Amino acid sequence: MVPEIINLFAPLKTPPTTEVFEELFRGSSFRVEKIVSTGQATPAGEWYDQEQAEWVVLLSGSAVLRFEGESESGRTLVPGDAVNIPAHCRHRVEATAADQETVWLAIHYEPAENR
């Protein structure tokens, strides 16, 4: 089998009204996905509380990420910023750039100490 080459920055064919989650590949204890945001945010009052840890890097665009217990303003992310989010660390996306695609690369995994 010949490996497929993809471009993480290839623009979407149709601008979405919701975030796009594309699983790129997975292993026995992890998965890698590309996320494309176009102005979306986590709905008011909702938080992500994930079973797995997540390492995420912002590749393009901009975003504001907030962790439970932090100020309302959150942390502004620019391309190249990465964060390792432990399992069950409640967080939310306060905002993403509305004027361009915000592209994330996320790795969801089981930490070594949980095996």
Image (cartoon, rainbow, N blue to C red):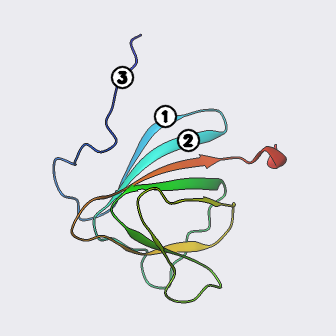
- Is residue 8 positioned above or below 102 on the image? above
Pointer 2 local density, CA inside 10 Å: few below 14, some 14–19, many at least 20: some
Pointer 3 local density, CA inside 10 Å: few below 14, some 14–19, many at least 20: few
Give the residue pinned by disc 2: 31
Q: Earlier in the sequence, mark 1 or mark 3?
A: 3
- Is residue 47 positioned above or below 24 on the image? below
Amino acid marked by disc 3: Glu
Query: At which x and y percent is residue 105?
Result: 46, 49
- Is residue 108 positioned above or below 26 on the image? below
Q: Please state, as top left, top right, bottom left or bottom right, where the N terminus lies in the image.
A: top left
- Cα separation, mark 3 vs mark 2, equals 17 Å
| Front residue of 57 and 94 | 57
User: On residue 25, which mark appears?
Assistant: 1
Amino acid marked by disc 2: Arg
The residue furthest left is 14
Q: Are marks 1 and 2 in contact (CB under 8 Å)?
A: yes
- Is residue 55 positioned above or below 50 on the image? above
Give the residue pinned by disc 3: 4
